[in-house]
Amino acid sequence: MGLWLAHEPLVLASRSESRRAALAAAAIPVEVKPADIDERAIEAGAGTKSASEVALLLARAKAFAVAAKQPRRLVLGADQTLALGTRLFAKPAHLSAARDQLKSLRGRTHELHSGLVLVRDGAVLFQDCEIARLTMREFSDDFLESYIEAVGLAVTTSVGGYQIEGAGIQLFERIHGDHFTILGLPLLRLLQYLRRAGCLCD
């Protein structure tokens, strides 16, 4: 008997490779079915919601969009927002935007709010949002240009303009928070729920 006890793999409503890899490494079989939603429109319509509320709103939208086409399946939506004080950041649209964003974060502490929502047939079974606090160092403009040249368009694929598991770690001075929260998936709380629900061996 394996660790995963459910009859079918978990459906991940996200194209994030780091989320897929984290689940797979935890011995959870995964089917990736990215959600087709307009994240920017959802963010724009969020009004005065907090960073955590926006992360959960996006995760819920992803999960429901995919679950509508996957009856009786467990579908996991996940998303992440970045807050610098009261200012919320989205994924940079291009290299120039990523450069400006990293300059705004340089030498300051920001928060990553990582939300997940687990649904089945239109019902929310579990949701959680965790926060990590990261302080970027006062790197030079020369370093920033070298970093962007080294990572290329990957700088536009995450909300912070970095992958902490890669060269992005060089941007930081201090990190407080769970590693999986930084990756965009608060995995420990999810595993606790899946054990209680009988989907994982206890």
Image (cartoon, helix red, strand yellow):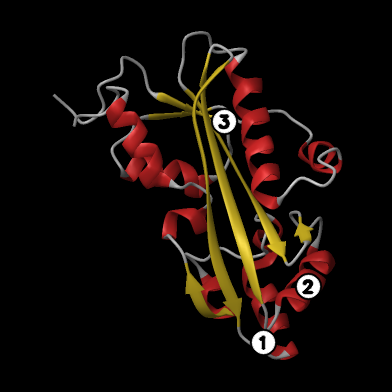
Tell me which amino acid carries mark 3: Ala
- Of marks 2 and 1, which one's residue comes earlier in the chain? 2
Q: Position of residue 35 (x, y in %)?
A: 65, 29
Label 1 secondary element? helix
* Relative to 41, 157 lies left or right: left
Q: Quadrant of the N terminus?
A: top left
Label 3 near label 1: C-beta < 8 Å? Answer: no
| Residue 84, horizontal then vertical, whole percent | 72, 67
**What residue would you read off at disc 3?**
13
Q: Are marks 3 and 2 in contact (CB under 8 Å)?
A: no
Secondary structure at numbered mark 2: helix
Q: Which residue is mark 1?
A: 143
Q: Is residue 129 left or right of residue 38?
A: left
What amino acid is labelled 1 in the image?
A: Phe
Q: Residues within 10 Å of mark 1 (few under 14, many from 20)?
A: few
Q: Label 3 vs label 2: CA separation?
A: 29 Å
Mark sitting earlier along the chain (3/2) = 3
Kindly identify which residue carries mark 2. Answer: 99
Please rate how many residues cluster around mark 2, counting C-alpha atoms within 10 Å: few if below 14, some from 14 to 19, many from 20. some
